[in-house]
Image (spheres, rainbow, N blue to C red):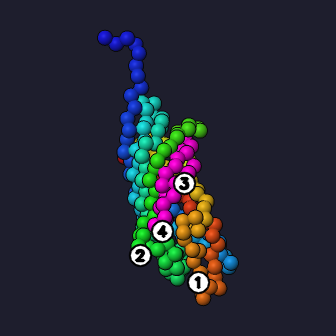
Amino acid sequence: FATGFCEAVVAQTPYQSQEIDIRLNGTSNIHDWEMKAVKGSSEASFTIDLKNKVTALTSLSFILPATNLKSEHKVMDNNTYKALKTAKNPNLSFVLASATVVLTGTDTYQLNFSGKLTIAGTTKETNLIATAKYNPADKSLTITGVKKMKMTDYNVKPPKALIGTIKQGDNISISYTKKYTR
């Protein structure tokens, strides 16, 4: 017999991301540069309660074939692939270790998560902060964020071109937007 007490039922829901926008930005001694990727794969599990509130991010993995990163210059692309050691390490990847979800506005959340980021065969624990926007109508989540780092932290030697006259800086930022659907 019902006593009037009702627990909020929550469910872990698997999501996939086919729509991504990854941008790798950096500098050189000549000009700033950008590489973009729109193809990669990501899976995540979010816990969403009966009130359509995201309460947890319980798993997340992301794989980006490094050769999906493209600039406006084929020579730059090839130099970047060489620096990223794509012959031996074709993918950039991230695997979630832990996460917290904080409601910051109507259907908007801050995600604080850590996990293992692998670039050019080097894996390191890293922290990320992202914004998630939940759309109750189609139950999708769009996650955006930026991670600043140094290439040398991942044993990547900043690429050079034209016999070393063009040198990329060590500091880069990776900005990302991923739309997750059920």
Mark 1 Cα-neighbour bin, 10 Å: few <14, some 14–19, many ≥20? few
Q: Which is more toward the observer, 9 or 63? A: 63
Disc 1 to disc 4: CB gap under 8 Å: no
Residue 23 marker: none
Of callouts 1 and 4, the N-terminal one: 4
Q: Which residues are magenta?
A: 108-129
User: What kind of residue is marked 4?
Assistant: Ala
Label 2 and label 1: CA atoms lie apart by 19 Å
Q: Nearer the viewer, mark 3 or mark 1?
A: 3
Under circle 1, the secondary element is: strand
The residue to which callout 3 is attached is 126
Q: Is-magenta flag for residue 116? A: yes
Q: Residue furthest right?
A: 29
* First in residue order: circle 3 vs circle 4: 4
Quadrant (top left/top right/bottom left/bottom right) for the N terminus:
top left
Q: Nearer the viewer, mark 2 or mark 1?
A: 2
Kind of residue indicated by mark 3:
Thr
Q: Residue at x 50, y 43 (%)?
A: 99
- The residue where tag 2 is placed is 87
| Mark earlier in primary sequence (3, 2) | 2
What x and y, as percent, mark residue 41? 40, 59
Residue denoted by label 4: 120
Quick one: label 2 or label 4, which is nearer the N terminus?
2
